[in-house]
């Protein structure tokens, strides 16, 4: 099936927005220690750029990673999220900043934030590069959002389709005959 890519957000604009987000996050956390939890795999490039900026601005960060997968048709509220890799740092009495690539239905981020709170974090704030508000199934708003985008399937800058396109330096819309967002199958992050 032929795929075509249309540029959506170029690298320079991502860099500019990331630096704006850095200022807000640094202002909010000031001198507090924070554990940054990065959702694999899609958030790895965004999180690498953002965390280096946060550290340059003086935030004391410790990093950890987790991985989730969603099952079922993401158009249905019954879509289930499961954990494939958990964090290893103890989170009791810690402030956590959870970073993901994109929020779509909201089920993943909501599930992961609750999971981290159950592990003892006193506060879990959420940060995403992209938000597709039109697809939300639950009432969940991340604390920090890079860009709001329409209901299109996006690849590049860490985001993939079938593990391809992650290394594009900017974000692009992937056009296929069937929108991969609406396929009924397991979707790893
Ligand atoms: P939600 O918010 O629906 O997000 O739980 C589930 C996961 O779906 C993936 N997702 C995408 N991945 N391009 C991608 O590469 C997209 O346009 C897209 N929309 C959703 C993503 O892994 C998210 O964490």
Image: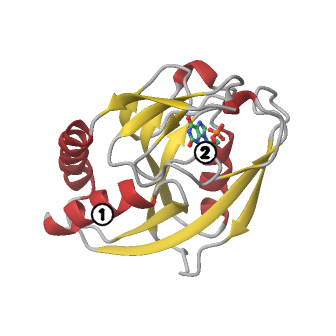
| Secondary structure at numbered mark 1 | helix
Q: Residue at x 60, y 55 (%)?
A: 163
Expressed as whole percent of the image width and height from the top left, the position of residue 114 reads 65, 54
Mark 1 C-beta closer than 8 Å to ligand 1: no
Q: Is residue 144 above or below residue 62?
A: above
Disc 1 or disc 2, which is closer to the eye?
Answer: 2
Q: Residue at x 85, y 35 (%)?
A: 78
**In which quadrant of the rendered image does the N terminus lie?**
top right
Residue at 54% x, 24% y is 152
Asked if residue 146 shows in the view, the reply is yes
Q: As drawn, is 26 to the left or to the right of 36?
A: left
* Point 49% across, 48% down: residue: 165
| Whether residue 63 is situated above or below residue 22 in the rendered picture | below
- Local packing at callout 1 (Cα closer than 10 Å; few below 14, some 14-19, many 20+) is many
Residue labelled with disc 1: 51
- The residue indicated by pointer 2 is 161
- Display coloring: secondary structure
- In the rendered view, tell whether residue 129 sits above or below residue 167: above
Q: Nearer the viewer, residue 142 or 153?
A: 153
Q: Which label's residue is closer to the chain start, 1 or 2?
A: 1
Mark 2 vs ligand 1: CB under 8 Å? Answer: yes
Q: Residue furthest left?
A: 57
In which quarter of the view is residue 2 placed?
top right
Numbered tag placed on residue 22 in the rendering? none
Q: Secondary structure at mark 2?
A: loop
Q: Nearer the viewer, residue 136 or 10?
A: 10
Figure quadrant of residue 24: top left
Q: Position of residue 38 (x, y in %)?
A: 48, 62
| Position above or below: 46 against 181 | below
Residue 58 in view in this figure: no
The x, y position of residue 81, in whole percent, is: 76, 50
């Amino acid at each position: 099936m032929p795929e075509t890519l249309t540029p959506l957000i170029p690298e320079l604009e991502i860099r500019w927005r990331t630096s704006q987000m850095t200022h807000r996050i640094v202002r909010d956390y000031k001198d507090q220690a924070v554990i940054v939890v990065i959702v694999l795999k899609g958030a790895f490039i965004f999180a690498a750029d953002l965390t280096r900026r946060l550290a340059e601005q003086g935030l004391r960060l410790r990093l950890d990673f987790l991985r989730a997968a969603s099952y079922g048709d993401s158009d249905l509220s019954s879509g289930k999220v499961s954990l494939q890799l958990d964090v290893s740092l103890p989170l009791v009495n810690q402030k956590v900043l959870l970073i993901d690539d994109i929020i779509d239905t909201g089920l993943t981020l909501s599930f992961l934030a609750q999971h981290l709170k159950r592990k003892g974090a006193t506060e879990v704030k959420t940060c995403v590069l992209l938000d597709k508000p039109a697809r939300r199934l639950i009432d969940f708003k991340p604390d920090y959002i890079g860009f709001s985008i329409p209901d299109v399937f996006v690849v590049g800058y860490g985001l993939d389709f079938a593990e391809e396109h992650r290394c594009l330096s900017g974000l692009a819309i992937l056009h296929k005959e069937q929108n991969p967002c609406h396929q009924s199958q397991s979707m790893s992050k």
